Amino acid sequence: MGPRGRWRPWCLLAPFRGSCLFLFFCLHMGASCPQACQCPDHAGAVAVHCSGRGLQEVPRDLPADTVLLKLDANKISRIPNGAFQHLQQLKELDLSHNAIETIGPAAFSGLAGGLRLLDLSHNGIRRIPKDALGKLSAKIRLSHNPLHCECALQEALWELKLDPDSVDEIACHTSAQEEFVGKPLIQVLDSGVSFCSTHHKTTDVAMLVTMFGWFAMVITYIVYYVRHNQEDARRHLEYLKSLPSAPVSKDPVGSAP
């Protein structure tokens, strides 16, 4: 068939079986392409090409046995949770040259074991969703994204298997430290810079300031408490001194009753 559907070879036997229902079943089993996509032969595997089709979201009717999926050069801005969870045989996924800014934490669920290549280059990604990408064993392309270089990005990259051919093109579009804006991220990290050390120092300073504030409050309360008790004690002593002295009667020594 054309790009909209694929025949199974054994379905050619359908007319000899004398069953239109069987033929319909064969066509149903042969996964069809999404509208506006093409499914050319790809070394015997199912390839789905949806490049440059003006798509604004991931198609929902992708064949379940897709091995290669090209969604590059579209207008996709977000990858929702479970967008590819039914594509258990997917090996390569090309999402480059889109407008992706948001990736759900479970966007690539179901692909952890089989996916070999994930291309997210040339998008609008500022922060790496560690929950979404950290479990993938695939090589990941992240070049030409407006990444914000900070501790969270550095920690996320530790868990990713970056594509070595494009890793040098990952640059800091913005940064927690202005001097690294526009510089290749790997070059910055290789020089010994750690965005997390700055983050930890800031956190430590904040904790010290907070602890000092609590300590000052405790000291102030103790001083107030002591002074208040001293004032009460002084007033009580003055009150006792102001009381009239009681006369003391003395019996004559040896006097008779």
Image (cartoon, rainbow, N blue to C red):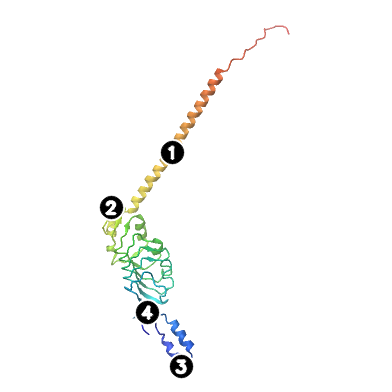
- The foreground one among 103 and 131 is 103
- The foreground one among 104 and 60 is 60
**Amino acid type assigned to the residue bearing label 4 in the image:** Ala
**Amino acid type assigned to the residue bearing label 3 in the image:** Phe
Return the disc, 4 or 2, that comes first in the chain's sequence.
Answer: 4
| Residue 65 position within the rendered picture, expressed as x and y whole percent measured from the top left | 41, 77
Residue at 41% from the left image edge and 62% from the top image edge:
131
**Furthest-right residue in this view:** 257
- Label 1 vs label 2, nearer the camera: 2
Q: Can residue 42 be seen in this view?
A: no
* Figure quadrant of the N terminus: bottom left
- Within 10 Å of the Cα at label 4, are there few (<14), some (14-19), or many (20+) other Cα atoms? some
Query: Would residue 203 be found to the left or right of residue 165 on screen?
Result: right
| Residue 83 position within the rendered picture, expressed as x and y whole percent measured from the top left | 41, 69
Under circle 3, the secondary element is: helix
* Label of residue 45 in the image: 4
Return the disc, 1 or 2, that comes first in the chain's sequence.
Answer: 2
Under circle 1, the secondary element is: helix
Q: Is residue 231 visible?
A: yes
Under circle 2, the secondary element is: helix
| Residue 146 position within the rendered picture, expressed as x and y whole percent measured from the top left | 30, 60
* Label of residue 215 in the image: 1
- Label 3 vs label 1, nearer the camera: 3
